[in-house]
Image (spheres, helix red, strand yellow):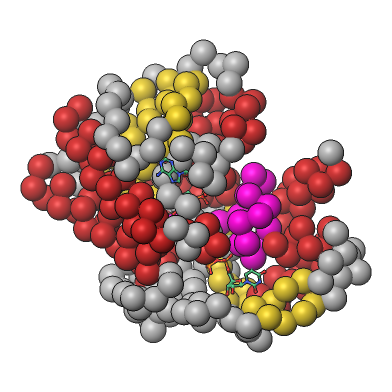
Amino acid sequence: MKRILVTGGAGFIGSHLCEKLVSQGHDVICLDNYFTGSKLNISHLMDNHYFEVVRHDVTHPYFAEVDEIYNLACPASPIHYQYNPIKTIKTSVMGAINMLGLAKRIKAKILQASTSEVYGDPLEHPQTENYWGNVNPIGIRSCYDEGKRCAESLFMNYHRQNNVRIKIVRIFNTYGPRMNQNDGRVVSNFIVQALKNEPITIFGDGNQTRSFQYIDDLIEGMLRMMNSRDGFYGPVNIGNPHEFSMLNLANEIIDLTGSGSKIIYKPLPEDDPTQRQPDITLAKKELNNWEPKIELREGLKKTIEYFDNLLTT
Ligand code: NAD
Ligand code: UDP
């Protein structure tokens, strides 16, 4: 049994991670300020004696004796991270400094939830970890992209300067139950719109692409990364290489829900990446042949079931 701290533990990904770690018998502290997360996401874990919740903001120092830290605290959807962009940068940068400082003091291993957004609107396709990215440093997405890039730099520097044991994963678009239905991400938006028979809002012409990974595949990848060999720090891409256009996604969701929704077109947000697909060669090599197992249609069915229950209860 390990003592494990999960920052952002009440969010979409964090709650699934806490659930998995608790089920493996670990002693888990879930730290969150509930900006985008919710107690409902973790309510089913509250009765477990090895699960503890702390209301705390990672921009302030925190101390606990743990063996491992997963640093996930940060709003992840464009609507939420652009709501207070200065706070988003502080969360990524000061959150990383505070958690790395803690890891250094208590000699814990620490994993950073980085993002495919570090590649920006990529000029190389698919993206390997060696690609340095194409990010607009002053655009409206930069509070998130540059915050995450700075956090990666901090992780590498704490490692080089202070021998902190780090792991960095670059997560590609992930979906599944417990996504926040109001956070504007494409999968939750389209599913909720389809279930309510409301128009499906495609931004731009719908030919932009993303590669969607189901939550369970991501959690498995994160656990394997935390437990990967000493000397492997990443960054490593964790995502599903199967790429879909937003039009494909809308049609798939209309088909699966049997919805009568029509597609409508809205302006493309500023700096919206045109394409994104992970090269997962490194993950396969270093993470014991890790690769996604759940294809889009199967994962969408589970996610639709979740939102259907949520909307009808
Ligand atoms: P989420 O918004 O559901 O979860 C983020 C959690 O962090 C929330 O519970 C929120 O309340 C908490 N939080 C935010 N600011 C905080 C602060 N200052 N102090 C303490 N807690 C704070 O998002 P998610 O999709 O679960 O993303 C989790 C992590 O994974 C994020 O770091 C995100 O950047 C990264 N990521 C997610 C995706 C994705 O597709 N979901 C892709 C790439 C990277
Ligand atoms: N998108 C869309 N309709 C929506 C929400 C999003 O067409 O209702 C598009 C968005 O412009 C982007 C893609 O879907 O091209 C993925 O958006 P999301 O916010 O989920 O993720 P990110 O852009 O951060 O990869």
Q: Residue drawn 77% across and 79% down?
A: 264
Residue 67: horizontal and vertical position, in percent? 29, 27
Q: Nearer the viewer, residue 137 or 301?
A: 137
- Count of labels shown? 0
Q: Residue drawn 72% across and 51% down?
A: 303
Residue 199: horizontal and vertical position, in percent? 81, 71
Q: Quadrant of residue 209?
A: bottom right
The quadrant of the picture occupied by the N terminus is top left
Q: Residue drawn 22% across and 58% down?
A: 153
Q: Residue drawn 42% across and 65% down?
A: 116
Is 143 on the left-hand or right-hand side of 53?
A: left
The reply to whether residue 286 is in sight is no
The reply to whether residue 60 is in sight is yes
Majority secondary structure of the magenta segment? Answer: loop
Does residue 138 sit above or below 95 in this rendering?
below
Is 49 on the left-hand or right-hand side of 155?
A: right
Does residue 281 sit above or below 110 in this rendering?
below
Is 256 on the left-hand or right-hand side of 9?
A: right
Q: Quadrant of residue 252?
A: bottom right
- Farthest residue to the left: give it: 161
Q: Nearer the viewer, residue 157 or 278?
A: 157
Q: Nearer the viewer, residue 286 or 34?
A: 34
The quadrant of the picture occupied by the C terminus is top right
Residue 155: horizontal and vertical position, in percent? 23, 50
- Farthest residue to the top: give it: 49
Residue 158: horizontal and vertical position, in percent? 16, 47
Bounds of the magenta span? 170-188
Report if residue 175 lies within the magenta region: yes
Q: Nearer the viewer, residue 289 or 80?
A: 80
